[in-house]
């Protein structure tokens, strides 16, 4: 017995020792696992509590992605990579393809911010496939990133396609702020395509959205960009107004972000308006701010502009000083091609001062730095030709002039080919979108027809059940009367749809067909081909716009006045901007408070649309269209007036626009009159409110 007790005690001691060993091994394993797991950087304060509360793998995945998205805005590339990578590891374990796609999309976005488009491309394209069943917000973000990627890699047509998808997806979410953020990418794409007017429209729309949302800082930056684009278009008064508005907003917020760019834009505007002294003041302010912010890349064009303004002020030494600063900064940053351009400008300055040795030196340095001979700058060649002529070396001057002419001819041919290719690509895109719009409209009409048939069948069954109690004769009479009324309504609907499609779209489609046949069957020089493509592209866009209006009209059965007014405002900017017409659109508070019926809303929009069409067609010398909606004795009154110099005719010939407008007004119990004045033509429609 004693031996047994001694053996039992020994076993107990050995068991306790074994337990301690196991505990130590477990602790070591836990420590090893913790050391193997990647250390995540601190999360933003707003998400730390959510990060601590995430217990399950799915919750941690979602929270990691939220943190990565927040850090991408900063931007914090290391933080995004850490949290997105951790989320992807968890998502792969759970077979969550959408989360894997979101992780890759965020990492691709950060790479785009760093200028690494080649590294971002595979991540974003792979994410597009993985996000097919993901939340709409994730899909919209990735489509926006793809638009940025394609814009940076000179694929404007594909970039615009993704921009439209992202804009529509953000719209379905009611995310107007994200829609406005797309304006930056769209502006770059449109400018690359040589469409600054479209870029200006996009920026103006974004500024309006940001103003409605109270995004003051974002609106100021957008207005500054709009001023820059309008300066490029030569619309200097508008550019000056928007630039000053942007600067005042930034100064009120005491924000340095963007002020340097706005000062530079104001300087460029003043210089273009032949006010070099005023321009110098703006450029000095911009240079000082850019130096403090260490934005060296933006200093280069500012130095060049300052040099030009100083030259206009007859201050040659200062002009040379600032132009040399631009050259040295390009060399410091390793920018070979910009350095060559700035050297050419410096050579021109020396030529104007008759400092022929320096002019020759910098012109030759500029030519030596031009790596791409196809894009060779002719300015240094012109300087060298002037130097040769000054020295009496006329054979050399003639040789250089011939070389300049050959380069100009080659550039002209190349630009023509590029324009033709761009117009063809734009035409193909517009044609594809138009076909999609037509198919969508047909599908909707068919769906509405099926709904009408189903409703008629249900009503017929209900009517037959009740009429059976009243007798066969009475049932037959009522059913026949019902079918007659229903057939009349169906006929009216089909006639309205057919009329709208025929009037608004049919003629344009016929033009597209004829223009396409002419383009294919009648070869022409590049200039004529480009003109035909421009006409074809314009006609396609108008057809797509008209189809969109017809489709929108099908869905106004529940539309109220605010929605109709918003559509009217957008339609004005879309139609009149193409005709270089300014828009002054205003709605009085009393008119906005009215709640007219559906028929009034529909006819109001159709009258308004016809009035704008008449201005574009019959007032070629007009510069501004004024649109006013007001309330008069309970009626909703629409006034559309242009400022075409007169005297205007008592009526505008061609078509039946005014008669159609009067018929539409009288159909809902309203009135319409028009007035031809010394300067302008006005249409006024008053409809029941």
Image (tube, rainbow, N blue to C red):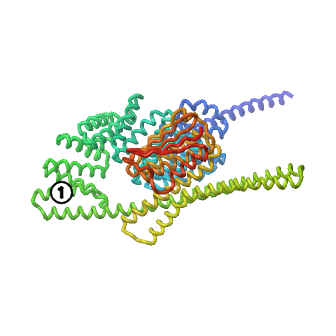
Position in image of residue 68 (x %, y %): 54, 39
Residue 453 vertical position relative to residue 262 in the rendered view, above or below: below
Q: Position of residue 32 (x, y in %)?
A: 60, 38
Whether residue 400 sits left or right of residue 73 in the image: it is left
For residue 257, what is the image quadrant? top left
Image-based side of 682 in relation to 554, left or right: left
Number of numbered tags placed on the structure image: 1
Camera sees residue 424:
yes
**Which sits in the foreground, 541 or 103?**
541
Q: Name which residue lies at 34% across and 36% down.
A: 260
**Residue found farthest to the left:** 392
Q: Is residue 410 above or below residue 606?
A: below
In the rendering, at what x and y percent does residue 19 appear? Answer: 72, 32
Crowd around label 1: few <14 · some 14–19 · many ≥20 (10 Å): many
Instruction: For residue 37, say whether it is visible.
Output: no
Quarter of the image where the C terminus is located: top right
- Secondary element under disc 1, as helix, strand or loop, is helix
Tell me where residue 76 appears, x and y as whole percent: 48, 38
Residue at the spot of label 1: 384
Please identify the quadrant where the N terminus is shown.
Answer: top right
């Amino acid at each position: 017995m004693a031996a047994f007790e001694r053996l039992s005690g020994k076993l107990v001691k050995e068991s306790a020792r074994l337990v301690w060993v196991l505990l130590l091994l477990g602790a070591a394993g836990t420590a090893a696992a913790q050391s193997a797991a990647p250390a995540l950087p601190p999360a933003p304060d707003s998400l730390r509590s959510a990060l601590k509360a995430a217990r399950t793998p799915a919750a941690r995945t979602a929270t990691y992605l939220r943190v990565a998205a927040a850090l991408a805005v900063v931007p914090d590339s290391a933080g995004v990579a850490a949290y997105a990578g951790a989320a992807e590891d968890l998502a792969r374990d759970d077979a969550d393809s959408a989360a894997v796609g979101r992780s890759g999309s965020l990492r691709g976005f950060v790479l785009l911010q760093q200028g690494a488009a080649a590294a971002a491309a595979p991540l974003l394209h792979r994410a597009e496939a993985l996000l097919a069943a993901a939340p709409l917000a994730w899909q919209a973000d990735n489509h926006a990133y793809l638009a940025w990627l394609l814009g940076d890699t000179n694929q404007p047509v594909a970039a615009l396609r993704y921009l439209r998808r992202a804009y529509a997806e953000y719209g379905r979410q009611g995310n107007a702020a994200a829609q406005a953020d797309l304006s930056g990418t769209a502006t770059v794409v449109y400018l690359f395509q040589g469409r600054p007017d479209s870029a200006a429209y996009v920026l103006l729309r974004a500024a309006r959205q940001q103003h409605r949302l109270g995004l003051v800082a974002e609106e100021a930056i957008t207005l500054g960009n709009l001023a820059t684009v309008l300066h490029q278009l030569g619309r200097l008064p508008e550019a000056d107004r928007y630039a000053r508005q942007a600067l005042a907003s930034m100064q009120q917020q005491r924000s340095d972000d963007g002020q340097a760019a706005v000062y530079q834009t104001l300087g460029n505007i003043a210089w273009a308006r032949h006010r070099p002294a005023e321009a110098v003041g703006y450029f000095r302010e911009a240079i000082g701010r850019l130096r403090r912010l260490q934005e060296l890349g933006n200093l280069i064009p500012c130095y060049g502009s300052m040099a030009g303004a100083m030259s206009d002020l007859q201050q040659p030494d200062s002009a040379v000083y600032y132009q040399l600063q631009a050259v040295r900064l390009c060399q410091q940053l390793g920018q070979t091609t910009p350095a060559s351009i700035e050297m050419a400008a410096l050579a021109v300055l020396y030529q104007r001062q008759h400092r022929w040795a320096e002019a020759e030196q910098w012109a030759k340095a500029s030519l030596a730095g031009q790596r791409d001979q196809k894009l060779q700058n002719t300015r240094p060649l012109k300087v060298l030709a002037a130097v040769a002529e000054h020295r009496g070396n006329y054979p050399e001057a003639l040789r250089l002039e011939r070389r300049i002419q050959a380069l100009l001819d080659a550039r002209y041919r190349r630009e023509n080919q590029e324009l033709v290719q761009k117009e063809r690509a734009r035409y193909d895109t517009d044609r594809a979108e138009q076909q999609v719009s037509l198919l969508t409209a047909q599908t909707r009409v068919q769906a509405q027809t099926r709904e009408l048939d189903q409703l008629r069948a249900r009503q017929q069954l209900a009517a037959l059940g009740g009429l059976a109690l009243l007798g066969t004769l009475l049932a037959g009479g009522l059913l026949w009367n019902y079918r007659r009324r229903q057939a009349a309504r169906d006929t009216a609907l089909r006639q309205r749809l057919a009329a709208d499609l025929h009037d608004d779209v049919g003629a344009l489609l016929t033009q597209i067909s004829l223009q396409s046949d002419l383009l294919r069957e009648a070869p022409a020089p590049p200039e004529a081909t480009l003109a035909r493509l421009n006409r074809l592209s314009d006609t396609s866009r108008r057809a797509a716009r008209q189809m969109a209006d017809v489709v929108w009209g099908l869905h106004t059965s529940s539309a109220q006045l605010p929605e109709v007014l918003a559509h009217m405002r957008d339609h004005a900017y879309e139609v009149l901007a193409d005709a270089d017409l300014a828009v002054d659109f205003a709605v009085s508070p009393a008119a906005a408070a009215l709640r007219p019926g559906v028929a009034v809303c529909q006819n109001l929009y159709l009258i308004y649309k016809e009035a704008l069409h008449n201005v574009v067609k019959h007032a070629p010398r007009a510069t501004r269209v004024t649109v006013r909606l007001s309330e008069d004795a309970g009626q909703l009154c629409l006034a559309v007036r242009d400022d075409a110099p007169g005297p205007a005719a008592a009526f505008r010939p061609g078509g039946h626009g005014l008669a159609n407008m009067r018929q539409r007004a009288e159909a809902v119990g309203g009135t319409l009159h028009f007035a031809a004045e010394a300067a302008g033509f006005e249409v006024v429609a008053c409809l029941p409110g």
